[in-house]
Amino acid sequence: HGVTGVHFAEQNMDDIMGAMLLAESIDWDADAIRESAIPFSTEVFKEKISKIVGKYLAE
């Protein structure tokens, strides 16, 4: 498993249930998960899209 989730090989009931059971048994690091999610935040999205739109409007 990784720092922020559990990988499973195939999208079938057995693999998904196994991953869910494993995930429930892990003592997750909330700070690491939060840090990993920052690049996908609304604020980061807005900054990136504003830069892209601004670049094309300036042309």
Image (cartoon, grey):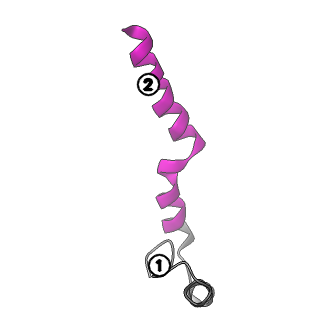
Q: Which mark is residue 23?
A: none
From this view, report whether residue 7 is shown above or below residue 39: below
From this view, report whether residue 30 is shown above or below residue 25: above
Q: Residue at x 52, y 57 (%)?
A: 37
Q: Which mark sits nearer the N-terminus, 2 or 1?
A: 1
Of residues 35 and 15, the one nearer the viewer is 15
From this view, report whether residue 6 is shown above or below residue 39: below
Local packing at callout 1 (Cα closer than 10 Å; few below 14, some 14-19, many 20+) is some
Residue 29, magenta (yes or no): no
Q: Position of residue 15 (x, y in %)?
A: 55, 87
Kindly identify the amino acid type of the residue bearing the numbered disc 1: His
Residue that badge 1 annotates: 7
Magenta stretch prevailing secondary structure? helix
Q: Residue at x 43, y 77 (%)?
A: 2
Residue 43, magenta (yes or no): yes
Kindly identify the amino acid type of the residue bearing the numbered disc 2: Lys
- In which quadrant is the C terminus drawn? top left
Q: Position of residue 21 (x, y in %)?
A: 62, 90
- Asked if marks 2 and 1 touch (Cβ < 8 Å), the reply is no
| Quadrant of the rendered image containing residue 46 | top right
**What secondary structure is found at the residue carrying circle 2?**
helix
Of residues 53 and 37, the one nearer the viewer is 53
**What secondary structure is found at the residue carrying circle 1?**
loop
Of residues 37 and 16, the one nearer the viewer is 16
| Distance Cα–Cα, label 2 vs label 1 | 34 Å
**Magenta region:** 32-59
Q: How many marks?
A: 2
Q: Position of residue 22 (x, y in %)?
A: 56, 89
Q: Which mark is residue 51?
A: 2
- In which quadrant is the N terminus drawn? bottom left
